[in-house]
Image (cartoon, rainbow, N blue to C red):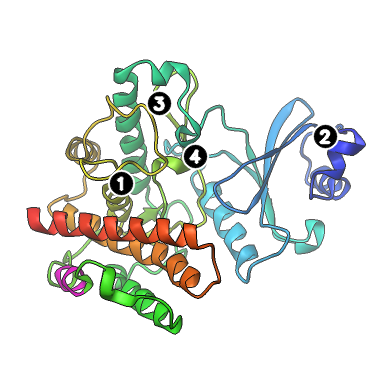
């Protein structure tokens, strides 16, 4: 067990965790090398060793949100379903739906040997443009592999609602934007580049059909980990938005978040030279997927619109004094940039 000062800093009942692991027959012995990890969300991540094996525990924040436990159960379900596939993901070990054990649902995964590029590149990756080029292609190959998984065979039938999935998208995110009118101080649509044109283009160019599959939902580079000793993708992380729908939604997310001549990449990864262009990434996806990419720009426009609509919420709350003004202004600028990118994609197609 860690010393008392270490234990006091960890917001998890370690005795209850130990007893639960014993009950389900996992490795025995003291919990050692306890380390809280920084994640992309407010969820709690705890790495520890037990019985010669490394574990990572993931649970919701101490102050639970309305859907925190359901989110944990969904994450655990999709990670367990991916076991045995070639999709780079955290290896699922066990999950607990009994909220009484630690005060919330949680699960255990294997520790990932890798680094998050948004936290800085390793020397190997920072020093060689060819390594960075391969990083981008490996990232895309992992995404294509996820989209190729037979979700029904993997046990994920009922995990999402693929019927009418694409038809729901533009209206849903337009309603999200319109909901910010509840904040009287919000400047509204006046500063956002021609929202109506984006929505009408999405409706007019809706892809006619798709083969349903697993969507990560937020697979930009800040939600990846890469191997320390190569350019290969080690895992997609933060699966809380995973669902069943059109996997090209994930490719669209790349189209919204990848650096171009106008905007930097999400996570401000440096150095950036060597990474493939967006067009090269889309072509690479096509080589590794049987999916029809004729409508690829539609997914990019949708992703720009969706992400912008989400980010604008913080600006609306900041306008009403319910979020930091500096953060609201920064995210508002990102929304404008995303909508401008959507217009550029529309103009090209």
Cα separation, mark 1 vs mark 4, equals 18 Å
Q: Which residues are magenta?
A: 196-201
The percent coordinates of residue 2 (x first, y second) are 86, 33
The label on residue 243 is: none
Residue pictured at 52% horizontal, 56% vertical: 240
Numbered disc 4: secondary structure? loop
Is disc 2 in contact with disc 3, using a CB cutoff of under 8 Å?
Answer: no
Q: Which residue is mark 3?
A: 232
Numbered disc 1: secondary structure? helix
Q: Is residue 136 magenta?
A: no
Earlier in the chain: of badge 4 and badge 3, it is 4
Q: Which residue is mark 4?
A: 89
The percent coordinates of residue 51 (x first, y second) are 79, 28
Within 10 angstroms of label 3, few (less than 14), some, or many (20 or more) residues? many
Q: In the image, which is nearer the foreground, mark 1 or mark 3? A: 1
Cα separation, mark 1 vs mark 3, equals 17 Å
| Res. 349 visible in picture | no
Residue pictured at 48% horizontal, 58% vertical: 326
Earlier in the chain: of badge 1 and badge 3, it is 3
Q: Main secondary structure of the magenta part?
A: helix
The label on residue 254 is: 1
């Amino acid at each position: 067990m860690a010393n008392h000062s270490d234990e006091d800093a960890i917001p998890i009942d370690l005795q209850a965790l130990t007893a639960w692991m014993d009950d389900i027959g996992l490795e025995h012995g003291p919990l050692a090398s306890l380390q809280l990890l920084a994640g992309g969300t407010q969820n709690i991540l705890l790495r520890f060793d037990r019985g010669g094996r490394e574990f990572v525990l993931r649970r919701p924040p101490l102050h639970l949100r309305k859907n925190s436990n359901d989110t944990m159960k969904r994450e655990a379900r999709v990670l367990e379903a991916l076991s045995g596939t070639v999709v780079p993901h955290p290896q699922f070990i066990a999950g607990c739906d009994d909220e009484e054990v630690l005060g919330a649902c949680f699960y255990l995964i294997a520790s990932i040997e890798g680094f998050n590029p948004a936290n800085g590149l390793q020397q190997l990756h920072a020093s060689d443009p060819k390594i960075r080029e391969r990083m981008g292609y490996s990232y895309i190959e992992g995404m294509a592999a996820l989209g190729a998984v037979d979700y029904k065979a993997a046990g994920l039938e009922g995990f999402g609602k693929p019927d009418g999935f694409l038809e729901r998208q533009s209206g849903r995110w337009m309603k999200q934007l319109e909901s910010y009118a509840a904040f009287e101080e919000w400047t509204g649509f006046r500063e956002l580049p021609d929202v109506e044109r984006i929505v009408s283009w999405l409706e007019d160019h809706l892809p006619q059909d798709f083969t349903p599959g697993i969507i990560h939902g937020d697979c930009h580079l800040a939600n990846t980990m890469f191997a320390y000793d190569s350019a290969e993708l080690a895992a997609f992380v933060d699966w809380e938005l995973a669902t069943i729908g059109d996997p090209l939604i994930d490719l669209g997310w790349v189209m919204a978040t990848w650096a171009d001549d106008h905007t930097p990449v999400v996570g401000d990864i440096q150095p950036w030279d060597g990474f493939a262009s967006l067009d090269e990434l889309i072509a690479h996806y096509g080589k590794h997927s049987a999916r029809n990419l004729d409508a690829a720009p539609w997914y990019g426009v949708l992703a720009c619109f969706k992400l912008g609509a989400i980010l604008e919420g913080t600006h609306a709350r900041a306008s009403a004094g319910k979020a930091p003004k500096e953060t609201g202004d920064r995210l508002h600028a990102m929304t404008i940039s995303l909508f401008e990118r959507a217009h550029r994609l529309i103009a090209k197609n």
